[in-house]
Amino acid sequence: MAKSKTLKLFWWKGNDGVPNLGDELGPLLFERLFKLRVAFAGMQQCEAISVGSILGWPVKSGLLDKRSTPLHVLGSGFMHGRRMDVPAKTKVKVHFVRGALSHAKLDPDNPQAGVMGDLGLLTGDAVRPSTRRVRPYLLIPHHSRIQDPRYQAFVARHPGAAILDMRTADLDAACQMISQSGMVISQSLHGLVMSDALGVPNVWLRGETLHGGADFKFFDYFSSVGRPSQLSVSALDAPDTLLQLERNAFELGRATLMRLKDDLYRATEGFLANR
């Protein structure tokens, strides 16, 4: 039987219908890099889940038990570190998870993780990034904090700085802004992931709890790229803010990025060849 060129994928969608680029990355990358049509499907009907902290949903909801075929996992992670029942291996086929913390929850009897990484690390192959840096700082708030006056004030204090609103599905425009920036300061996990993918130094803006998972998803991703978890800033209005940004910036090495990308391509192509 010929393989379908349409991939039935589940990803997070808000009830308000407003996209969040971090969650839209999965379908966009499958379409651009693997030449597939992607159709959104519910957790019972989808073939796979990919980008996002959505690995806990099918487990805690009981939907795995209602599936007739295994759910394929391609880079998803958990939102939090709370204890949970481990799903039966007949119900989940893990090709790779986002990081070591998600792996440890999913397979506690096998602490040695295999392939790990966020599919968003392939972003640089899906766009044409700029090679010209035109702004010193790009601030990427969490999508729920885009109107925070503290961030508007930071941009006003630093000529040329800008804010990227992740409530979009325009991958090209977002990557153009990131690649044109000397440094990215991000509350958004995928602001950091995309910056790593595009070779732009970035700083994690930490300091307030945005969801029930706290920092779990960040530490999970950091484990896959070897990023020290203490590299962060908690405010942008301190007298030594610029010094703290320089001290806490992270830049993913090219060799590490290429190794991770090779692993992610190999695992994803293996899934596609056998679906």
Image (tube, rainbow, N blue to C red):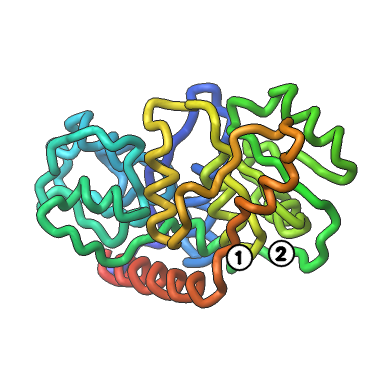
Choose top left, top right, bottom left or bottom right for residue 17.
top right
| In the rendered image, the vertical position of residue 79 relative to residue 16, given as above or below | below
Mark positioned earlier in the residue sequence (2 or 1): 1
Which of these two is toward me, 205 or 181?
205
Q: Position of residue 197 (x, y in %)?
A: 57, 62
Mark 1 nearby-residue class (10 Å; few <14, some 14–19, many ≥20): some
Q: Amino acid at mark 1?
A: Gly
Q: Position of residue 249 (x, y in %)?
A: 62, 54
Q: Residue at x 76, y 55 (%)?
A: 181
Choose top left, top right, bottom left or bottom right for residue 6.
bottom left
Mark 2 nearby-residue class (10 Å; few <14, some 14–19, many ≥20): many
**Secondary-structure class at tag 2:** loop
Is label 2 in contact with label 1 (beta carbons under 8 Å)? yes
Left or right: where 52 falls relative to 252: left
Which of these two is toward me, 90 or 274?
90
Q: Position of residue 241 (x, y in %)?
A: 72, 40
Q: Residues under labels 2 and 1: Cα distance? A: 7 Å
**Secondary-structure class at tag 1:** helix
Residue annotated with mark 1: 124
Label count reads: 2
Q: Amino acid at mark 2?
A: Pro
Q: Residue at x 68, y 47 (%)?
A: 245
Q: Residue at x 43, y 49 (%)?
A: 51
Q: Position of residue 203 (x, y in %)?
A: 61, 48
The residue most toward the front is: 239
| In the rendered image, the vertical position of residue 154 relative to residue 10, given as above or below | above
Residue annotated with mark 2: 129
Left or right: where 269 falls relative to 181: left
